Image (tube, rainbow, N blue to C red):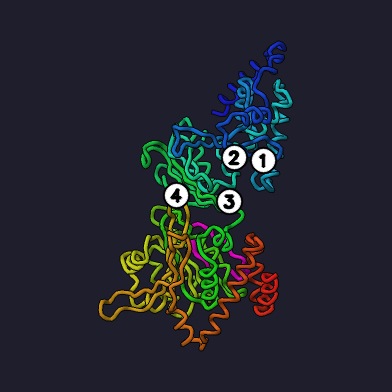
Amino acid sequence: MKFNILKDSLSAIQKIQTIKKSDLKGDKKLPKVISDEIKEETKIPQYMTLSKLDWDNNEIHAGIIKDPTAKGGLRYQVIEPVLSERDQKAFEIIKKLLMTELTVSLHDIKSKKDAERRLKKKISSMIKKYRLKIPPKNIAKINYFAVRDFVYLGKIEPLMRDHMIEEISCDGTNIPIYIWHREHESMPTNIIYEKDSELNNFSRKMAYVCGKHVSMADPIIDASLPNGSRINLTLGHEITKRGSTFTIRRFRADPITVIDLIKFGTISIDIAAYMWYLAEKKSTMLVAGGTASGKTTALNALATFIRPGEKVVSIEDTQELNLPHENWIPAVSRQNFTDTQVGEINQFDLLRAALRQRPDIIIVGETRGREAYTLFQAMATGHGGFSSIHADSVDATLTRLTSSPMDVPKALISNSLDLITLQLKIRVGDKSLRRVIQVSEIDGVDERTGQIKTHEIFKWNPKTDNHDYMGDSVIFRKLKERDGDTEEKINYELTKRRLALEWMVRNDIRDHKEVSANVMDYYADPERYYERKRLEVQI
């Protein structure tokens, strides 16, 4: 097979080599480089936004245009260098030659940049070796596409470099790739996988990059890309009738912090101060919400409040949490190696192992199976615990916990769980927003009905888009009995944390590391931190 590929490649090379010099002069009529194209495109009024993507010196742009045929009337356009027909043929030849001649060991490649350098060097040597007549400016374009396809994720790589994109979705062959844009929400793109073979090969590549295997026998995988992004992938037409599919939930290199959530309006400063105080007291909390409501983001922000030095063990299917704590064990489950489930390590196994590691705080990315019972047992013995759960109300959360496959007894829930935060994705006008709808405390079991009692401590007001404090905290009552705290002391502790958060909001301290550093500074000397920031806020 390799011989045939090489034969075809050499035949095409000979054709290029026989191109007349007069044909080369016609190169001036080829499409201009992308920078010139952008200048021209910006004159077109339907371009709402146009921005350069981060890709070394390459002119790669992303634009959003008005398109009445698309959902929401908008379409996302990736604008890349344009290859002439002649250069496209040369590129196809180079790709085939690379597949046969590129013999670099993965162990020798130190980084992506090193891989780019090696690839460009190899292309340069092949152009000389086979005497390909390619203008120098066009070699740069070919290098771009080669690096894009061989080193990175091919067609979708520009999408991965746009920080405004939260999600990338492919629904099959000959269907535009869809994205979820942070500002404009769902919209189609101009990227399409036109052939089944192309999309299937890409799916296999993605599985390989994630360290997984996908095949017709095992056509569905959930995994994490090297940058932390979450991917769900299917292969072929047997499972999804329109061809292979994938959905990528983007990992933010710059994680959303609690200060971001306050500025977004997702939570209030009062809620954040309240949760900070409870996190320090090792209270147990569940973040409930629907799909894409920001549950993991809320968990990650909440974990920032954990006291430095405490041992934290996190358990996830795919790693998404990013904690600033040094004493932290991030555990990730593993799929089985065979159909007999040999080698499988699930969340239940990880949780059992975590209890032998003497953690102060246990964080479970999402509770959905038999690990729930073990988690609640651990929380009942004094371990602090955070987790998320898929539910659209507090009542639905409790129903899920007490039903199969979790089957957590109501008495165990009431004795171990302190708080449920309900976070939903809602529409306000023409925008989709994430809001904490309510914060409810667990108040034991009703002796008459046998149902778990809850007390709403914070509630979102849709008319004002504010969070109202309902008062009479059950947890504060418990803390008074357990720790001997007075009402005045609790209020003072909340005031200190509220002011710390207010200072960070005012000064736009939203970087993950900066927020974490401020929380650490607070714990180092709360009184000094409070007095210093109080004076700054008053000025």
* Residue that label 1 marks: 55
- Identify the element where label 4 is drawn: loop
Is 2 on the left-hand or right-hand side of 350?
Answer: right
Spatial distance from mark 3 to mark 2, Cα to Cα? 16 Å
> Who's the residue at 42% across and 47% down the image?
220
> Sequence-wise, which precedes: disc 3 or disc 2?
2
Residue receiving disc 2: 158
Residue nearer the viewer, 471 or 67: 471
Query: What kind of element bears circle 1?
Result: loop
The residue that label 3 is drawn on is 226
Would you name the residue on which mark 4 appears? 429
Nearest the eye: 197 or 440: 440
Mark 1 is surrounded, within 10 Å at the Cα level, by few (under 14), some (14 to 19) or many (20 or more) other residues, namely few
Q: Nearer the viewer, mark 3 or mark 2?
A: 2
Circle nearer the N terminus (1, 4): 1
Q: Position of residue 417 (x, y in %)?
A: 42, 74
Asked if residue 212 is among those painted magenta in the image, a careful observer would answer no
